[in-house]
Amino acid sequence: MPLTLLDLSIIAAYILIILAVGFYVGKNEKLEDFLVNRRKTKLVLLVTSLVSSTVGAAFVFGIASGAYQSGMSLGITLVLVYIPGFMLVSYFAPKINRFGRKYNAHTISDFFAIRYSNRVRAIAALLTLITFFVFLAIQFVAVASLIKVITGIDFTIGLLLSALATIAYISASGIKSDFYTDFLQFWLVIIFLFILLIPIGLMNLGGFESLKSLPATYFDPFAFGGLEFFIGALILGVPLLLVDMSMWQRIYAAEGEKTAKRVYLWGLLIIIPFAILPTLLGMMAAVALPNTDPDSVIFELMVKFLPTGLLGIGLAGVLAVVMSTIDSMLMVGTATLTKDFYKTFFNKDADEKTMLKMARIFTIVFGLLGLLTAFLYPDILQLTLVGSFILVVLSPAMLGAFFWKRANSTAAFWSMLAGFVALLAFLPSMPKTAFIPSVLAAAAVFVILSYTAGHSEDETLNPA
């Protein structure tokens, strides 16, 4: 169904509103506004921002793609990971918030630097940057896929136009305007997923009855990646959220320790349904739309079944899903480049004005690097897995920092390096389960060196 003037007007109005809010809230910003909203953010803004940024392209379209190809397995696995994962983050949130205020921290690598050393900061920051390059690329791929499905514009052109426009907007805002735009995008995502896509599934795809015609493998909880992926994800995936810097940024920005803790409990209750719906839609689409590109299946459903007007709202919802996550990805990259590399290693005496200027420049640089990644490997599902696999390598050093007095700088550094090298070695032959040997390697190195190496003078054993 071609876009009508009404559809285009709805999309244009949404983009203009988001741009206006972002630029208005972001004007006259200081560095603390840009990075952590002066650590005064209220619970409602934090919860809506958490949900909006979590329920991004990797989440919605990745789950739908996995369900279209192999059924309920990926969605169920992610729900079972998110429940203990969010509870774990909630448990540590007060301590992280307290640490942020005590040391004026802005990144997860600030924690690694204080607890271990600047050498550990550097490798943690590098792995975080690589991870969020990948996550950012996913959002750009999703936007380009949407443009191609709806307008027929070539992938390359669509990707360029959408990416450059988004980078330009975010480079002028920062996390303060991110919170306010995410608040608006949260409600649009609700409309998109629960008011628009539920009727598609129930009224046009045959509803739950259509699922009966799927092969039995679509109801196998181990279909995606096998039993190894399922068990490995449950055991090793839970700490993934604890080493996700976008989680730390929201905790740093919270107005207090109690607020930081409650954010993730409320977020968990809201996010679980968001994982279930794309799973059901992907499975229904496997019946109704066979031989469709899995990464574009939700877009195909919208174009095929939504009438004029609702299609415009639906497309604005897709943009909300993507843009709200791009905000977070860019902010992670910007803060890491500005604080962990520029300030720490290149210009220790940089004043606030210089730091804010560099933060805006790094936003553009990081965005363009994410765009390049999207060109090189435009596969939403596999990009999601690779990014998550890299991030989870940090988990042994993170858990050790909180729980184990023997944990030391040498163990943390070589643990991260060994885990990343193992991931690169196993990824070609184990694309869905390479995180298992990589995390095991990281954990083994961490434990051995924690026993055999001593603490350095730079370490702070009780940073929070």
Image (cartoon, rainbow, N blue to C red):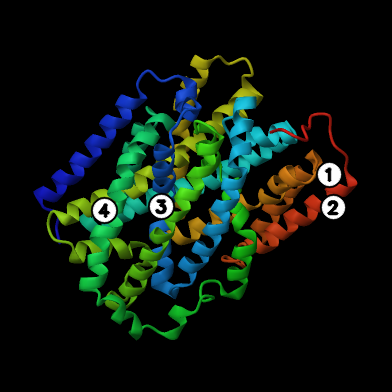
Q: Are marks 4 and 2 in contact (CB under 8 Å)?
A: no
Q: Are marks 1 and 4 in contact (CB under 8 Å)?
A: no
The nearer-to-camera label among 1 and 2 is 1
Residue under numbered circle 4: 191
The nearer-to-camera label among 2 and 3 is 3
Residue under numbered circle 3: 55
Question: Residue 430 location in percent, x, y?
Answer: 61, 67
Distance from Cα at disc 4 to Cα at disc 3: 13 Å
The residue drawn where x is 50% and y is 32% is 253
Residue under numbered circle 1: 406
The nearer-to-camera label among 4 and 2 is 4
The kind of secondary structure element at disc 4 is helix
- Label 3 environment density (alpha carbons within 10 Å; few <14, some 14–19, many ≥20): many
Question: Residue 284 location in percent, x, y?
Answer: 32, 74
Disc with the residue nearer the chain's start (4 vs 3)? 3
Distance from Cα at disc 4 to Cα at disc 2: 51 Å
Disc with the residue nearer the chain's start (3 vs 1)? 3
Residue under numbered circle 2: 448
- Label 1 environment density (alpha carbons within 10 Å; few <14, some 14–19, many ≥20): some
Q: Are marks 3 and 1 in contact (CB under 8 Å)?
A: no
Nearer the observer, 218 or 179: 179
Q: Is residue 318 visible?
A: no
- Label 4 environment density (alpha carbons within 10 Å; few <14, some 14–19, many ≥20): some
Distance from Cα at disc 1 to Cα at disc 2: 10 Å
Amino acid type, callout 1: Arg
The kind of secondary structure element at disc 3 is loop
Distance from Cα at disc 3 to Cα at disc 1: 37 Å
